Amino acid sequence: MRTGAAAGHVGYYHEAVLFDSDEHLLAVVLPFLLGGVEAGEPAVVGFGGRHAELVRRALPAGSGVTFLPGGDLYARPTAAIRSYRNLLASYLADGAQQIRIVGELPPSALGSTWDWWARYESAINHAYDDFPLWSMCAYDTRIAPARVLADVERTHPRVARPDGSHVPTGVYTEPTSYLTESRPMLPDPLQRTAPVVELTDPTPAEARAAVHATDRGQLPADDVEDLVVAVSEMVTNALRHGLPPARLRLWSGADRIVATVSDGGDGPKDPFAGLLPATTGSAGGLGLWISHQSRNHVVLHRGPDGFTVRLTAGNPHFPV
């Protein structure tokens, strides 16, 4: 039997915490966690270093709250979804009637790579909906840009407040709509220069050779090979499932290689393509899933001229 604000709810109860001070954060998070422990529910914290320590010190000794280790949990959206689904499945197998989790993305996710984390926040409304999960995603309004906070409200059905209320955002958008919108692609500064390679309708073999030719030794060999595979998959998708012409462009910088693959089509029909395993047989779904596993940043863009995938190997972070 579920408890708290999620009592009677079926599936994923997804909330945001938009806090502006440590006191604000603790006023929401502590009752949430301790209420779970009191009800015999798993209560889990997925915070980074400072906020994890803040919560740990505020909890009573032996509280029973579980703190997830840091590391690569939020290295990529696909990795986060896979890790959390495995965790949720383990609690469910142990008989949990509800699981409470409070987490936060690293500050770096709120910058140039926010677009795929916004897609993550939307997609998990579907990806976790087969679990009795109640989670709160914390965002510090002092550092989160306005565009991030706008997306947070659209990807979270409600906001948890210090007074104990749980208020609908009023602008929540279902994933099937949110994920298929035409969203602007924030240009990488490298794209303000001429690409070092530009090919029209290349074969996958030509695409792979182009990536190798672009490599100047600035990245580990494994990163380059992962990009080779991802570009090959995206070119194959564009040729098989898109509309001509298919174009490959490559840029090379001191700490990264950026590739774009575009065609004149509308992109995949599956709104969750890339973030969740392709189980519907949707065109190009497997290739996008592969690309999301190994790249440091993947952008999907639908525009009047067609569909574009941008892949970044190396450091995807730049001033915005």
Image (tube, rainbow, N blue to C red):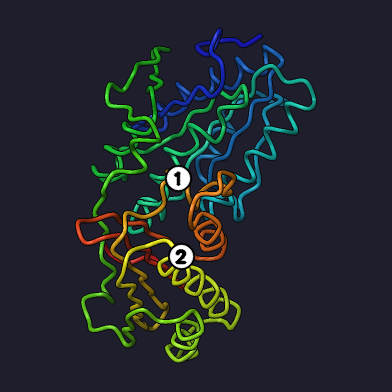
**Please, which residue is most extreme toward the right here?**
94
Q: Is residue 244 left or right of residue 121?
A: left
Give me the residue at 33% from left, 78% from top.
Answer: 249
State how many labels appear: 2
Residue 197 lies, in percent from the top left, at 34, 86
Query: Which quarter of the rendered picture does the N terminus lie within?
Result: top right
Q: Is residue 146 above or below residue 302?
A: above
The residue that disc 2 covers is 237
Residue 60 lies, in percent from the top left, at 65, 23
Q: Which amino acid does label 1 sit on?
A: Asp
Q: Is mark 1 on a helix, strand or loop?
A: loop
Give me the residue at 46% from left, 33% from top.
Answer: 137
Residue 24 lies, in percent from the top left, at 39, 26
Q: How crowded is mark 2: few (under 14 residues within 10 Å), some or many (20 or more)?
A: many
Query: Which quarter of the rendered picture does the C terminus lie within?
Result: bottom left
Q: Residues within 10 Å of mark 1 (few under 14, many from 20)?
A: some
Q: Which amino acid does label 2 sit on?
A: Asn
Q: Are marks 1 and 2 in contact (CB under 8 Å)?
A: no
How much space separates mark 1 and mark 2, taking CA atoms? 14 Å
126 vs 283, nearest the viewer: 283
Give me the residue at 42% from left, 70% from top.
Answer: 239
Q: Is residue 266 above or below residue 58?
A: below
The residue that disc 1 covers is 270
Say which label, 1 or 2, has the lower sequence index: 2
Q: In this view, does 137 lie above or below 206?
A: above
Q: In this view, does 5 lie to the left or right of 180?
A: right
Q: Is residue 177 left or right of residue 81?
A: left
Residue 36 lies, in percent from the top left, at 63, 17
